[in-house]
Image (spheres, coloured by chain):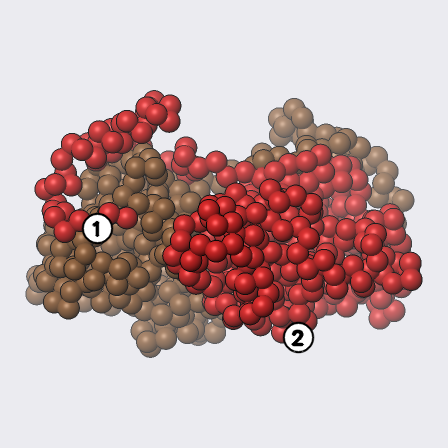
Chain colours: A red, B brown
Amino acid sequence: MNNNPNITRRSLLGGAMAATVMQTALANGLQVGLPDDPTKQMGTPPGKLGSRSRFETLAKAPSDISSRSPLQDFKGMITPSDLHFERHHNGVPTIDPATYSLTIHGLVDRPTVFTLADLKRFPSVSRIAFLECSGNFRTGKETMTPQDICGLTSQSEWSGVRLSTLFREVGVREKASWFLAEGGDAALMTRSIPVRKGWDDAIVAYAQNGEAIRPEQGYPVRLFLPGWEGNTSVKWLRRIELGDAPWHTREETSKYTETIKDGRIRQFSFDIDARSIITFPTYPAQIERGWVEVRGLAWSGRGKVSRVEVSTDAGKHWQVAELQAPVLDKAHTVFRHLWRWEGSETLITSRVVDETGYVQPTLKQLLDARGPDTGGYHMNPVTAWLIKPDGRVLYQPDYGR
Amino acid sequence: MNNNPNITRRSLLGGAMAATVMQTALANGLQVGLPDDPTKQMGTPPGKLGSRSRFETLAKAPSDISSRSPLQDFKGMITPSDLHFERHHNGVPTIDPATYSLTIHGLVDRPTVFTLADLKRFPSVSRIAFLECSGNFRTGKETMTPQDICGLTSQSEWSGVRLSTLFREVGVREKASWFLAEGGDAALMTRSIPVRKGWDDAIVAYAQNGEAIRPEQGYPVRLFLPGWEGNTSVKWLRRIELGDAPWHTREETSKYTETIKDGRIRQFSFDIDARSIITFPTYPAQIERGWVEVRGLAWSGRGKVSRVEVSTDAGKHWQVAELQAPVLDKAHTVFRHLWRWEGSETLITSRVVDETGYVQPTLKQLLDARGPDTGGYHMNPVTAWLIKPDGRVLYQPDYGR
């Protein structure tokens, strides 16, 4: 910041600023097409589609099976659709919406095949909600970012038809207690879902952030189960079968289960437990002394976030963070805490309490409950960041162990 | 919809469906890369950035000076950032964020030049709100879409620093009653704004829908004045000067003013008046008999939408539409009304009432108040659509005149 009592309009319009722009451009190798003074050159005309600035390099981090959202780069609660995390089990299929159909059958009075146009004709609903993969925890190195640690969570405004509307249309029978959701990808992803979730808040979604769902997110139609582990929100949804027992598919037996005490396995653990993570300051940021806005995201699959607490002294004291309104049900909620950093080495951390009273656990509490071989699902520990005296920020993998 | 009591899992897995997919693909000329059965071919691996489906063709409608959002194609309340309407006066400038600065001077104690990093260090805020150009009304032909009629309105989640925070930082003096906002584009867009808006809810915004503002929307920094005519939310913001009177710039004298009765001109008409428009069914849709979900958007620059009423009999009777929660302050709000259409020709229309009690006017009321040569600004008439007996939908330009 440059405080200068002699700033006038005239001094600003001189050549000094333009010269600086050009020098920086040359230094960055960006001189091609970068005007020395944008006010002296007509800009780009209006277009059919906008695009990112050439100076922005936001990207997901892909592996063979998933692609993680850059949580540390986001402002606010909406995830841009092309930066929504990906997790698929045999790639993203290409599905023609003109031939797409959803079949609902089994314990129903009127087995029905719905086209996309059929689905869009029913009364619709929209809601802003997070979607998180239940395998959303990586740890181990100080040089991990929020994207590395838990980048498999994103938030969109989802629109579609309530599954309860379709249940009424096909006449789901009273003895139906579960349904199978099957995807049309090359993994033929299948999950068993209690029918009460279908009557409650499940959506057969065809839109995301205002437009058609992106292919990676299930184009043209996905199931969306607010607050439940992401894998159950079956993408490229092509079939729903009503039954009176779970199917025990591969993805709910050998996968997507957790060990608990005494070597037993927990199955059908659908709810995403409340979690928070600081997204700034985090590795690789370097902060300066003085006021720092500690920011992050908090969410719960069981309802609204009630409170986020932030500690800037390694958990000795906790202060209540500000929550950005509106605080929505089963939604990423931005928290902020203004902190004056004087230059001492310290740990900063956050924990969330949701409206059911659930408190985000420490890593030790999770390991005590699950045993050492957790399988990696439903891990939502309190996460801490070390602030070095020079302002560098490092992840603390062993915090709370 | 195909109701078939004999659907079983086995019958679905046969070849009939795959054959149909391939035939349609060939008919559409889309056979290249379109698998005959997506479940039998591994899909695309995870990537750094997602993209739209090849089957989706959403686009804005550009002219020389603006680009209109396809309101009729949107679901929900968020506008995808690359489909946010554009309106600029000399093209989109390319601005290097590394050399960008915002100068605040004039009637302040500490004239200051802020870099982008400076602005991002202050406490931040996010809000979902609409932005509408005050010249957002076109009419005249039955074959106009919502995009044609009022596509210069869009909605994003905007993030940045409150202007009031910067006002405190520079020490805005008590006698400062107006400020000038100047853009860094080749139009050097300038507008005079009452200082009270800066103390109230103005944002110096650097993010839109989670990421950096798009170039067309003011990258790297724009002013955002919730609920006020879009032109005052100066893009590519580079200078704010505090003063004790308006500057009477070109864009608030020869433009962005309205005639009112007796030939007088209304200046500084900042608030966007409440408006609603049905976005489905609208031209060029064709509906079928039976249940039709009438959908649309409603908004007010003065606060929340209180009520939207829909008439399906040319204004003889009105019914209260359902509003999609959450209903936010100064935000596009989705309304829906389930209507059973029996096949008779009729007119459908909507009107909004906001929390100040303001009722959306008819075209006649607007023309009576403004005179025949309105100048085109701040026109928000009730809009109607003709449903033909064959289900075709046509805009009715003379409704309510």
Amino acid type at circle 2 is Gly
Depth-wise, is mark 1 or mark 2 nearer the camera?
1
Residue under the point 52% across and 71% down? A320
Is A188 displayed left or right of B372 in the figure?
A: right
Camera-side residue of A385 and B244? A385
Query: Label 2: chain?
Result: A
Per the image, the residue denoted by label 1 is A3
| Residue B98 numbered mark, or none | none
Mark 1: few, some, or many residues within 10 Å (few <14, many ≥20)? some
Query: Label 1: chain?
Result: A
How many numbered discs, if any?
A: 2
Under circle 1, the secondary element is strand
Under circle 2, the secondary element is loop
Is A82 displayed left or right of B134 in the figure?
A: right
Amino acid type at circle 1 is Asn
Is A40 displayed left or right of A84 in the figure?
A: left
- The picture quadrant where one finds residue B41 is top right
Camera-side residue of A393 and A167? A393
Q: Considering only vertical position in the picture, is B304 above or below B108?
A: below
Per the image, the residue denoted by label 2 is A357
* Mark 1 / mark 2, whichever is N-terminal: 1
- Observer able to see residue A264: yes
Is A190 displayed left or right of B56 in the figure?
A: right
Camera-side residue of A29 and A57? A29
- Observer able to see residue A100: no
Q: Considering only vertical position in the picture, is A118 above or below A60?
A: below
Residue lying farthest to the bottom in this orientation: B357
Residue under the point 84% across and 43% down? B12
Where does residue B103 sit, x and y in percent of width and height? 22, 48
Where does residue A231 sit, x and y in percent of width and height? 74, 51
